[in-house]
Amino acid sequence: MHSEKFEVVLPNQNQYWQRREILDRFDVLIQREDNWDGYDSKKPTESTIVHAKHLMEEFFDSIVSAEYSWLMPFISSDEDGNVTVEWSEEKRRLHIQIGENEVEYIQVWGTNIDTEMHVDFLNSDDYLKLWEWLLDE
């Protein structure tokens, strides 16, 4: 009789719960109405939230598959209905603004808008580079 070994690979439970927590944070945004903050801010559309969830899952997978530690971001929305995701680490902040059709990131390492901030469109090739910058690695 031939015996084969089967290895069952279970996802890292911590990563499972971290991913779940990220996605749960979007549930708050789904419940928002226009003027949610008392300043006439728009609520995020369903397609913006779906786009943001998908992007954050890709971002998360990229970071943990590279074996970096994950830092839980602050997730909210802005006055235009974009989803915002932000991490702060030491003197560096990474801010991602997700709209229905485009995504921008802002790197902040000081208060001077001309010399201590960088803004650009985000694509998946940027994920690890930005994470390494945030963690100063």
Image (cartoon, rainbow, N blue to C red):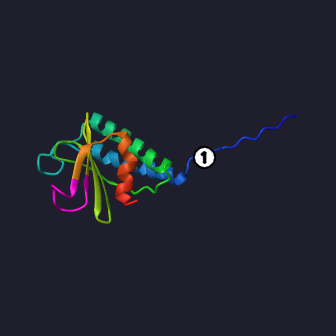
Looking at the image, which residue is at 16% across and 60% down? Answer: 112
Q: Position of residue 6 (x, y in %)?
A: 72, 41
Q: Nearer the viewer, residue 103 or 74?
A: 103
* Image vertical order of residue 71 relative to residue 24, above or below: below
Write down the residue under mark 1: 10
49 falls in the magenta region? no
* Number of marks in the rendered image: 1
Name which residue type carries label 1: Leu
Please tell me whether residue 16 is drawn above or below residue 54 in the rendered image. Answer: below
Looking at the rendered structure, the secondary structure element under dot 1 is: loop
| Residue plotted at (44% across, 45% down) | 62
Instruction: Assign the N terminus to one quadrant of the image.
Output: top right
Q: Nearer the viewer, residue 133 or 86?
A: 133
State which region is magenta. 107-117
Q: Residue furthest toward the right?
A: 1
Q: Position of residue 90 (x, y in %)?
A: 32, 66
- The quadrant holding residue 47 is top left
